[in-house]
Amino acid sequence: MPGTPFSAETRNNGDSTVIHLTGDIDRNAKDELEVAYNQAAARGPVILNFTDVDYINSTGIAVIVALLARARADGRPLRACGLSAHYREIFQITRLADFMTIYDDEPAALAVE
Amino acid sequence: MAILQRTRRKEDPTDRVAVQPPSQVGQAIPIPDHDPLLGYLLGVGAPVEVEKVTLESPALNEMRAAGVHLIVPLVSQGELIGTLNLGRRLSDQPYSTDDRKLLAGLASQVAPAIRVAQLVRQQEAEAKERERIDQELRVASLIQQTLLPKELPHLPGWKIEAYYQSARAVGGDIYDFIPLQDGRLGLVIGDVTDKGVPAALVMATTRTTLRTMATQSYDPGEVLAKANESLVPVIPPAMFVTCFYGVLNPSTGDIAYANAGHNLPYVRTSGGVVEMRATGMPLGLMTGMNYEVAYARLNPGEIVLLTSDGIVESHDRAGDMFGFPRLIDLVTKYDLEQDLISIILAQLDQFRGEDGEQEDDVTMVTIRRSSSAVESAVAFGEDPEVVASFALGSAPGAEREAMVRVASVAAELGLEGERLERLKTAVSEAAMNACEHGNKGDPDLPIEVSVLADSNKILVRIRDHGGGRSIPDPVIPNLEAKLAGEQSPRGWGLFLIEKMVDAMRTSTDDQYHTIELEMSRRED
């Protein structure tokens, strides 16, 4: 059963970058997510918007971990918004939430300096 | 010996012997146990004139210097319990025969009375001390009982039993079962030197430390080494902990273990008894210790016995120890259909004799692998009804299909909200493991999914063709290590499954590997 294909759209917003994610996040999301990150503004926080994501599995968690490692190496904060209650819990269980702050929605994530 | 000194005073009603005490006569002069005066007074048993005694006695010299003229020994039941020391008579006349008779009579009356008073006082002190000890024992025993496992782990195909009986003085024995990821079980048995509250507190610390370390590594040597590092600074210098730690993989029967100076466990195999040897120093003595790791495998029908030294160090009336040979003999010869713990306890009772006291805590844990695959399959769950079952080829996307189909069944069974989401994630992960690892991605090999339910719970079983080979130890995911590039970013599957469901079990036979996920139907 195929799921919803993954896509990522990068929107620069001053010194902040929003990457809007759509579809399933699993290992197949890796390349497209990296491309989206490459298009981010030169500096400032990167916000992952999960509003249109219904499914994340462990290989997707691995993709996010790899992106987080890269963002940390670049010295820029990674934030998350629009997560369902279930995936918010999974971000807490995996402790991803300790390294990327989770906001309810995009405006909240952007409001932080 | 308690020496009670008594000196007559001026206002004493027995005026015939009233004395004018020189200033120092009123002072108590103790007679040390080794002073010859002691034996002399006991031997004479009557008033003694200091001037007439020729003894090399420091106590006598002291009395002389204090102006003591007459010593009246107070003897009760052959024991000198004190003396009456008198100075010169007021008239400066020597003490007459009558005076001495009177004093001797007085002493014979006074001595038993003082003796009784002493005994009463002593008994009061002892009663108070007993009360204090009892209170301390109650506290120690309470700590210990709070920390020992309330229930035994239920592993399909395994029978685990434990016995613990504290000695009156509460010896600081510890045993514990630590559920690890993917259904493995940590086994702990240990013994804290010392007894009472201090031992119970060290036991509590050790238990917590081991539980923490056990979740960080499957390597029992590393678990003990790390526990040792953190225990050394917190355990009092004169105390230490002997401890066996093993990690049981119930689906294969493999036990990896390490031992910090604890009694060796015994495995009863078809070929006799095998000691599980591994060297290591007790915990809490010094830092930088290494613990050898060794491996054992329990075949169907075999049993491991873990003990504390309260068994082998029990004494009979003649003072002989129970000893290891007797224990090994019991494990070797007992009928496997019987209960090993009961047999050992019966032998121990017989050995100690009728009113033999239990000197130390007695702890035993047995872990037995069921003798047949049938038994192990039956133990997998008590008759829940199969609600749905289907098979899927091991192609990409199968995990999503398994997830969606199980979710619709589970929703019909009343599972909803966050708990339904959790089950979905667990099923997806388990199905993906089954396809990718169990069936190695072969699209022609199916995974079989079944959903079972009884009134309390929903079970999801996912079976793949990964039987007959050992499953490598999963690395417990550590996000810091992953972010630092020290661990692969992957490896979250089993971790997530375990966190999502109420219980997770695995089993393996020659052909199949099965994972069972359990979710309670009640909301709590």
Image: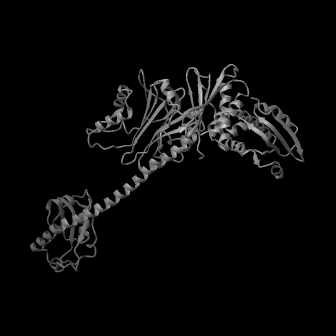
In the current view of this chain or complex, which residue is farthest to the top? B444
Is residue B210 visible in the rendered image? The answer is: yes
For the point 12% across and 71% down, the residue is B100
**Colour logic:** one colour
Camera-nearest residue between B129 and B271: B271
Is residue B3 visible in the rendered image? The answer is: no
Left or right: where does residue B285 sit relative to residue B430?
Answer: left
Q: Is residue B262 above or below residue B68?
A: above
Left or right: where does residue B205 sit relative to residue B167?
Answer: right
Provide residue B118's location: percent of width, then percent of height.
25, 64
Query: How many discs appear?
Result: 0
Question: Residue B446's quadrant in the figure?
Answer: top right
For the point 40% across and 54% down, the residue is B136
Provide residue B126's location: percent of width, then percent of height.
31, 59
Provide residue B222's location: percent of width, then percent of height.
57, 35
Left or right: where does residue B235 sit relative to residue B217?
Answer: left
Left or right: where does residue B159 sit relative to residue B434?
Answer: left
Quarter occupied by the N terminus of chain B? bottom left
Provide residue A103's location: percent of width, then percent of height.
77, 49
For the point 25% across and 67% down, the residue is B5
